Image (cartoon, grey):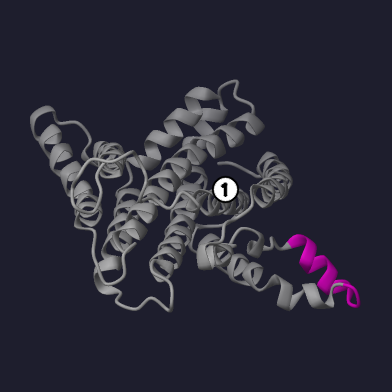
Amino acid sequence: MIAIAWLTALETVRQPICLILTTSAVLFIGVLPLVVNYTFGETGKVIRDSGLAVFLLMGVLLSTYAACLSITREMKSGTISAVLSKPVNRTLFLLAKFAGITGIILLYCLLVAVAVIMSERTVSELYEIDFYSAGSLLVAPFVAYLIAGLINYFSDRNFVSNAFALQFIVVMLAFVWTGFVDRTGAMQAFGLLYNWKLIPAAMLLTMALLTLLAIAVTLATRLDAVPTLVICSVVLMVGLLSDYFFGRHAETWWWAEIGYAVIPNWQHFWVVDGLTGGGEIQWSVVWATGRYALLYTTGVLCLAVSLFNFSEIK
């Protein structure tokens, strides 16, 4: 199971789309402070909210693509048949695939969360740009690409997987270095200018992406990539409006009650408004939402295992 999970993670990071989505998220979040010049009464609010929205959007695309790559594509190519012809349990195989993709999604979430924290610091002072934070965040992906290109040239190692790993390392180093300098470049205690209240918000979005990944894996056992992406997008949109569509009718209409129970309520995961005006997200909300995500993900994975065990593999 560990070997299958590791190979799944390795295969995922070797796909150019994985690197493109991750780099696009980091660069887009890094550029936001340089192009957005309105604050709506609170410095950093627009950057924070927009950055977390990019976090979620790119994560949805990455989760869906990775699920289809690991399951749908292998079912069509016959790779799964070769693996399952060995003494490999179907249930463990599917769970190992999910675990491998989960590892990549967690790396993505950590990387983009750090980018959002650095990006918000860039505009922590009204009408001023922290070029130490903005510059290090924007330069980091290009440094990673340059090093990966040199490694590929001299040792012929895979560029995409090296660039993904190096991008993660370089952005983390930039985050640590920037944390030790203030807006003038003077040394300070680590993280004084970082908004650590973003951590609970990032954790909630990570839970949302893992829940959506479970749904994508379930759909990938039966559908192609495009239908899987479309359905996941619909589930996301409907779930964000779950209280409006189903919640207010749940006590009077049976269909609304079923919809409210079946469709994940993504508003539990998107509580960014709690940070407005210097507020914070309570850890009790994180733990409660975590239990909800764990139970929902477990139920969806059970359905995925059932569908996969009874699917015909050629």
Dominant secondary structure of the residues highlighted in magenta in the image: helix
Q: Residue at x 26, y 64 (%)?
A: 31
Position above or below: 159 against 271: above
Q: Nearer the viewer, residue 118 or 86?
A: 118
In this picture, residue 43 sits left or right of residue 206:
left
Asked whether 231 falls inside the magenta stretch, the response is no
Q: Amino acid at mark 1?
A: Leu
Where residue 178 sits: x, y (%)? 26, 45
In this picture, residue 308 sits left or right of residue 98:
right
Q: Nearer the viewer, residue 195 or 268?
A: 195
Q: Residues within 10 Å of mark 1 (few under 14, many from 20)?
A: many
Q: Name the quarter where the C terminus is drawn.
A: top right
In this picture, residue 241 sits left or right of residue 122:
right
Which residue reaches farthest right?
A: 252
Residue tagged 1: 210
Q: Residue at x 66, y 45 (%)?
A: 311
Mark 1 secondary-structure assignment? helix
Position above or below: 200 against 163: below
Which stretch is magenta?
Answer: 251-262
Where residue 298 sits: x, y (%)? 71, 43
Q: Name the quarter where the N terminus is drawn.
A: top right
